[in-house]
Image (spheres, rainbow, N blue to C red):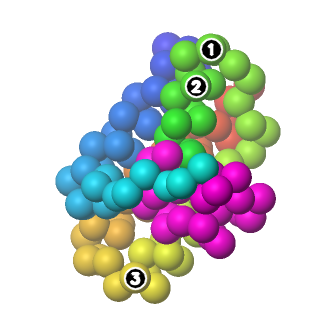
Amino acid sequence: MSVHQQLDQAVRRLEATLKASDLWRVEEPSAEAMASQQPFCVDSMSLPQWLRFVFIARLDTMVAAQAALPATCNVAPAADLYLKQEQARAGDRLLVVKAIEEVDQVINEAP
């Protein structure tokens, strides 16, 4: 299985986990919010918005184009911190962070 196929499977699992954790139903960010230059768009959107409309969207584009992947990816620690601050249910937080760790791992281990 190619790295792009592995990444696609990991992203689909992340999407399913976000849906099951009720973190998928978020308002689409404005064009101004999407133009943020801050890491994770922290100044303009919530982490669930960023995951859905920026992170997953960009990864889907890379997979579809069979494009080069980023050299590194370490989103899971930021997601864990965010979900702790938002006092997300422990089970949901664990599942979401694990799904993001899988995406991080696929990218970090890509040749």
Q: Residues within 10 Å of mark 3 (few under 14, many from 20)?
A: few
Magenta segment boundaries in residue numbering: 32-53
> Which numbered marker is on residue 5?
none
Residue 34 is a magenta residue = yes
Tell me residue 41's x, y (percent): 64, 62
- Label 3 is placed on what type of residue? Glu
* 17 in relation to 56, above or below: below
Mark 3 and mark 2: Cα distance apart in space: 29 Å
Mark 1 and mark 2: Cα distance apart in space: 6 Å
Q: Residues within 10 Å of mark 2 (few under 14, many from 20)?
A: few
Relative to the observer, which residue lies in front, 4 or 39? 39
Tell me residue 99's x, y (percent): 41, 50
Q: Which residue is mark 3?
A: 86
SS of the residue at dot 2?
helix
SS of the residue at dot 1?
helix
Mark 3 and mark 1: Cα distance apart in space: 35 Å
- Label 2 is placed on what type of residue? Thr
Q: Which residue is mark 2?
A: 61
C-beta proximity under 8 Å, tags 1 and 2: yes
Please name the residue shown 62% across and 14% down the image.
65
SS of the residue at dot 3?
loop
- Label 1 is placed on what type of residue? Ala
Tag 2 or tag 3, which sits nearer the N-term? 2
Would residue 19 appear left or right of 101 to someone viewing this image?
A: left
